[in-house]
Amino acid sequence: MLFNSLDFAIFLPVVFVLYWFVFNKSLKWQNLLVAAASYLFYGWWDWRFLSLILFSTLVDYFVGQHLGKTESPTRRKVLLWISILVNLGFLGFFKYYNFFLDNFKSAFSVAGYELNANSLNIILPVGISFYTFQTLSYTIDVYKKRLEPAKNFISFAAFVSFFPQLVAGPIERATNLLPQFYRNRKFEYSQGVDGMRQILWGLFKKVVIADNCAVYANHIFENSADMSGSTLLLGAVFFTFQIYGDFSGYSDIAIGTARLFGFNLMQNFAFPYFSRDIAEFWRRWHISLSTWFRDYVYIPLGGSRGGTWMKVRNTFIIFIVSGFWHGANWTFIVWGALNAIYFLPLLLAKRNRQNMEVVAQNSYLPSFKELWQMSLTFGLTVIAWVFFRAEDIGHAISYLGGMFSFSLFEFFRLEYGELISLILILILVIIEWFGRENQYAIEKVNKFKFIYRYLFYLSILSLIFWFYADNENFIYFQF
Amino acid sequence: MKKFLVKISFTLTILALIAYPLDLVISCQLKRNNSFEGELEVWNDIYNATNNYPIAIYGSSRAWIHVNSKIIEKELEKPTYNYGVNGYHFPMQYFRHQELLRFNNAPELIIITLDATSFQKLENLYNKVQFLPFVIYNNKMQDFVSNYNGFSYTDLNFPLCRYQGEDLVLLELIRDLVNPQSELRYQGFAGKDKKWTKDFIKAKNEFGTIEIVLDAGIIELFNKFISECKSKGIEVVMVYPPEYVDGQNFVSNRDQVINLYERLAARNSLKFLNYSKDQLSYEKKYFYNATHLNLMGANIFTDKLAKDLKKTEYFSDN
C-alpha cells in the first residue's frame, strides 16, 4: 500500500479509529491491532511475502528469548549467528543471488571456465532491507545486553512490522521503538497535530517535488546520449531533488503517521543539502541507516581507533557496504566508494566533525564561505547521484563525460514543465532553509497566527492536489 | 482527542466549503473561454437555451469547419447553427442533439455531415476540456462521458478533482482575465484560413492505410436518430463533404463506408448529398489537409451545398 494512494487514505483513518476508540482499553489489543494492520498494509502489495516477515519475526523472537536465558558465550554466539544467517540469508537470496551469480560467471569466463548456472527470476520483497536491519538490531542489542528480550510475541511482531516504517524506514533501533510497545499510549493533541503536519510536508515532498522531478530526470537519463552537457546537469539536479523528495518525504509521512498512534520514530533526514562538507551530509542523510552501519559495523570493526590504514579501511568498508545495501548493482558500489573518497580527506585531516551544528544558526542567510561550502558539497553529491541513478557503470561514465563536456555551457530552452519543477524546487529550498533548525521544515508553522497558518496549509494542500499523480512509486521501495 | 477530531473535521469542512464555490467560479470562468476549438461556445449556446435555429448542421470537424452557417442562412433564408463537434463520432453528435432538444426548440432541418469515421467506436475522450465546466452539474453529460476513458469516478463526482493537473486550463483562465478574446465560431462555424499542411503526409507515414471498423451499435443508434427525427417532423439530409483525392485511399474501405451511407439514406428515404468525388476534391488549394477544406474551400463547398439543398423537397415544399 502506498502512502500516496486512496487505499492508504481509507486505511489510515480506519486503523486510527479502531486504535483509539475500540482497542484503547488494552495495550495488548492495541499492539495486536498494529501488528494485524501492518500485515494487511504489507500484504496489500504481495501477501506471499508475509510469510517471510513472519518467519524472520519468529526466528528473532525465539533467538531473543533464548539469549535472555543463557549466559554461555558459545550458545549466545551460536544464537546470534542463527539470527544473522537467517536474516542476511533471506536478504542475500532475494536481493543479491543473481548479482553474485552473474559476477561469478563473468569472472570464471575471464579465467576461461564456463559456469552452468542460470539466473533465477526472483521478485525482491518490498522493504526487505529495512525490516531485516531493524530485526537484526534487536538480536545484536539483546546479544550485547543493551536490551532485554521482548516481553511478548505480539509486541515484538508489531515492532518488526510496524506499518509506518516497515517498507522504507526509518530503520528503527529496537532500543528506541520496542520499549514504546510496552508503554500505555495516550493520545496527545499536540503530537497528533504535529503528526498531521509532518505527513502534509512529506506528501508535498513526494507528490510535488519528487514526482515532478522524476518526469524530467527519467527523460534525461533515458536519453542521455542525445543531450547536451547543460541538459545532463539539469537531469542530475532533478534526480538529486527527486531522490531527496521521495525518500525524505516517505520518512516524514512515516514519522507523522507513527505520531498519530503515539510513537516517536527517529529523525531520518536533517536538511542534508545544506551540508558544508560530506561528513556533515552523511550525518544528515538517511540518518537511521548511517547510524546503523556506524553502530553495528563501523564500531565493531574498530571505528576510527587504530592507525590511519585502519581508518581508511573501515571508511571504505562502511561506504561500500552502504552502497551495496541499496541494490545489487555495481553503480551503487561505486556510489558508495565515491562517497568514501569524498570523505577520506576530511577524516585524514581530522576535520570530519567540524560542522556539527546547523548552518548559519540564528541568522537568515549563510555567509559567503558557508554558501561556497554548501554549493561545493551539493555539487559533489550531484555527481555521486549520477552513479546511483545510472543503469550501469558505462552509462554513468558516459553521462558524466557528456555533462563535463564543452556543451555544459550550451544554452538550452527550458520546457514549461521543467521551469515549473525548478520553481517548485526553489519553494522547497526556501521553506527548508527557514525551517532547518527543526526536526522537519514546517514544524514551527504552528507558531503562525491562525489565518497565516491555514493559508500556508491551504497552499501546500493546493500544490499537492494540483500535482498529484498516482503513477510514481517510492524509489526506496526497491531497496 | 476531541479537540483533534474537531480540528480535523473543521479543516475538512473548510476544504469542502471552499471546493464547491471554487469549482463553480472556475467553471463559470472557463465557460467564457473561446479556446479549445470553440466547443465551449457551442455548449454554452445550447445550455443557455438561446438556440432556436430552424436549420442545424451536425457532424464532426467536417461540419464545423466545412459548412458556413452564414452562407446557408443567406442562401436558404433561415437562421442556421452549426453543431459540429470536433474529433467525435456519431454518438457524441447524437448526445449534442439530445441536449439541444432538451433546452431549445427542435430544428426543422438537420444537415448531418458524415465522414469515414462517423460510425467507428471511440474509446478516449477528445478535447475533454469542453466538458469540464458542465460535467459535475449535468447528470446526462456525466453519464455520457463516463462511457469513454478520460474522467475518473472522483473527477465526475467531487468538486475540483477534474481540474487537477490541467495546467493549460489554468493558463487559459489567466490569459482570459488579462486579455479576453472574441468568439472563435460564428453560429458554430469557424473556417480555417490555412494553406496545405503536412498533417496528412505525417499520418500516412505513421499509419500507412487504415481500415474503418463499422460498429453495429452506432449504426443502430443512427437509425434510431432518424426515426426520432421523423416522429418529431424534423427533416434530415445526409451529406458527405469532399476529401482531397490523394487522401481518399488512406481509408482502405472508404467505398464500403460510403455505400453504407447510401443504403441507410435509401432505407430511410433521406436525401444523401455525396461530394466524395466532387470537382473540389481535385483542387489542393481548397484543402489544408486531406480531409479538411480551408476557409476558401469551405465557402465554395457551402455555396454548392446550399444550392443543392434548395433543390430538395424540404425547400420546394416550404
Image (cartoon, grey):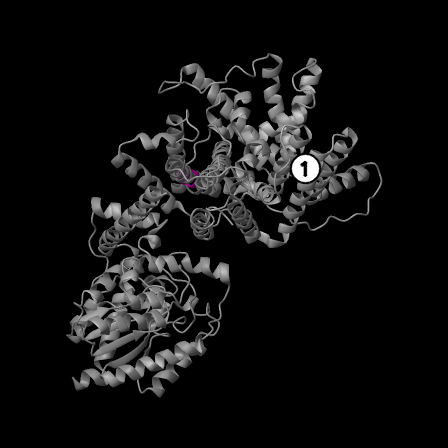
Q: Is residue A416 left or right of residue A210?
A: left
* Relative image position of residue A99 (x, y in whole percent): 71, 41
Q: Is residue A203 left or right of residue A342?
A: left
- Choose top left, top right, bottom left or bottom right for residue A113: top right
Image: B3 above or below A302: below
Image: A249 above or below B216: above
**Secondary structure mainly formed by the magenta segment:** helix
User: Is residue A272 visible to the viewer in this orientation of the structure?
Assistant: yes
B142 within the magenta span: no
Q: Residue at x 23, y 67 (%)?
A: B68
- Choose top left, top right, bottom left or bottom right for residue A301: top right
Q: Give the residues drawn in magenta, as a range.
A: A200-204
* Relative image position of residue A382 (x, y in whole percent): 52, 29
**Which residue matches tag 1?**
A64
Chain letter belonging to callout 1:
A
Q: Looking at this rendering, what residue extends furthest in the front direction?
A: A25
Q: Is residue B28 left or right of residue B127?
A: left
Query: Considering the numbered disc 1 on the image, is that residue within a helix, a strand or a loop?
Result: helix
Towards the viewer: B280 or B143:
B143
Q: How many marks?
A: 1
Towards the viewer: A51 or A191:
A191
User: Is residue A5 visible to the viewer in this orientation of the structure?
Assistant: no
- Choose top left, top right, bottom left or bottom right for residue A456: top left
* Relative image position of residue B197 (x, y in whole percent): 38, 56
Amino acid at circle 1: Gly
Q: Is residue A72 left or right of residue B215?
A: right
* Relative image position of residue A201 (x, y in whole percent): 41, 37
Image: A470 above or below A100: below
